[in-house]
Amino acid sequence: MWGYYILIVFMILIIILIIKTILFKKTLDQRSVEHIDVDEQKVLQALIKKIKIPTVSYRNSSLINQDAFKAFKSLLQTDYPLVNQHATYKEIGTGVLFHIKGKSKEKPIVLMAHFDVVPTSSNWSVEPFSGIIKNGYLYGRGTLDTKVTVNAIMESMEYVLSKNHKFKQDIYIAFSGEEEINGPTQQQMVEYFKQNHIKPYLVFDEGGAIVSNMFPGVKEHVAVVGVAEKGFMNVILSATSKGGHASAPPKHTPVTMLSDAVSKINNHKAFKMKLTQPIKTMFNGIAPYSSSFLIRMIFANQWLFNPLIKLIAKLSGGELYAMFKSTLAFTVLKGSNALNVLPNESSVGINIRISVADTSTDILHKLKKIIHNDAIDIKVVDVSEPTPTSLIDPAFDLIKNAVSKTWDDTITSPYLMVATTDSRHYHKICDRVYKFAPYQLTKEDLRLIHSDDERIKIENVINSTKFYIHFLNQI
């Protein structure tokens, strides 16, 4: 009799799984891309002009070419007459803030980017600030990160104003000149908004991009829009001793103590995988488009297949695996300066990316418990907590609509950022902070960010501007 009841329950479960899987299916709306008569050469030449200004940021301020930063800010004022005619201009920190009034100030929009870039090496095949075009690519530091976005925002704004577009809402353009060194400019911008009682309805910054082959069975491109960010924390573990000659070493030295701590941390299971809300929304945004019935069944029934989903992520590794847990990377190791001298002090640096399910306090507590050695000092150097998850509502559709009008066969989905952006500061004053770089990137393109021969496809330069025009036309 019990076997009969078990069979009935099993059959009901199978029926539920099948029904949920059938309902968990979407096909892409076949909307036509809307043509825009933008002057493509003007857009391209505008970016080349920006690339030629070497706005390289350094933590050592004495190395910064201040004239380059002044020249870039001057360009934003002289090259965009309509923007400057309609906007008020203010400099905050290293950045600039444009304010264009709309019919209402109830739901202001903030468009973000940064115009500083990381230093270059001597290994480039072209001059990094020459703006050379080769084989359909524009070369130069900042082409991907993120002068292309600065260019797209300014060119699109100039375009829509030339068409006498009247904005329904106030718009703020907030550019920083020190994002690459984690400078305080955007925090100062947030303080400005607070002090002036301005609560943004939507904040839009760099983040995900349009990628392909992201999900099993999904043939379409996917525009992944960050709705939350993992946090980060830099920690230094250190141990000390009296030092001395290496010919008569004690059993335990700073190096052996730290080696033991690193081994314990690296092999411990305390940092568990968790299926958090941003990951669920990402799967719900992409998985329904999969042509695989099995894949759709797994992700339509996450309540049942959670362990299997985690296993898939673990086997996949890389960014997908990193989304599920707090990660620790051992990055800096210091000891003695001589091979025959015991170190007075040794240290290990750890870069920790904090899951949205954890806090820095949770991580520190786990580290102390795992190491279990009072002789090792744990010092927090930098910390930024994970962000809340932004609302997915009609504001998100502004980005989704602009994507569909710019690119064919492209799904728009929420996404969890494993890296950090300046927009993390805006979560304090805004419930809808979206992180998206509006261009198509291959895996090879992604590897070029901060690397030698950074470059961007010409079509991405043009399409990013068209995207922002479609976005602005809705506001």
Image (spheres, rainbow, N blue to C red):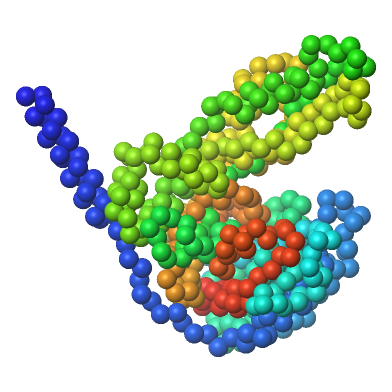
Q: Is residue 92 visible?
A: no
Query: Left or right of 89: which side holds 200?
Result: left
Q: Is residue 393 visible?
A: yes
Rendering quarter of residue 50: bottom right
Query: Left or right of 62: which side holds 92?
Result: left
Kindly give the residue lying farthest to the left in the view shown. 1
Q: Residue at coordinates 51% horizontally, 59% vertically from top-left? A: 225
Up-down: is 81 above or below 254? Answer: below
Provide residue 190's location: percent of width, then percent of height: 66, 55
Q: Residue at coordinates 55% horizontally, 83% vertically from top-left? A: 165
Provide residue 335's location: percent of width, then percent of height: 84, 28
Provide residue 138's location: percent of width, then percent of height: 70, 74
Q: Which quadrant, please, contains the N terminus?
A: top left
- Total labels: the figure holds 0
Viewer-side residue, 374 vs 217: 217
Q: Residue at coordinates 85% horizontally, 17% vertically from top-left? A: 241
Query: Left or right of 221: which side holds 148?
Result: right
Up-down: is 334 above or below 32? Answer: above
Up-down: is 265 above or below 203? Answer: above
Provide residue 338's location: percent of width, then percent of height: 92, 28
Rendering quarter of residue 454: bottom right
Q: Residue at coordinates 82% horizontally, 31% vertically from top-left? A: 334
Query: Left or right of 177: which side holds 243?
Result: right
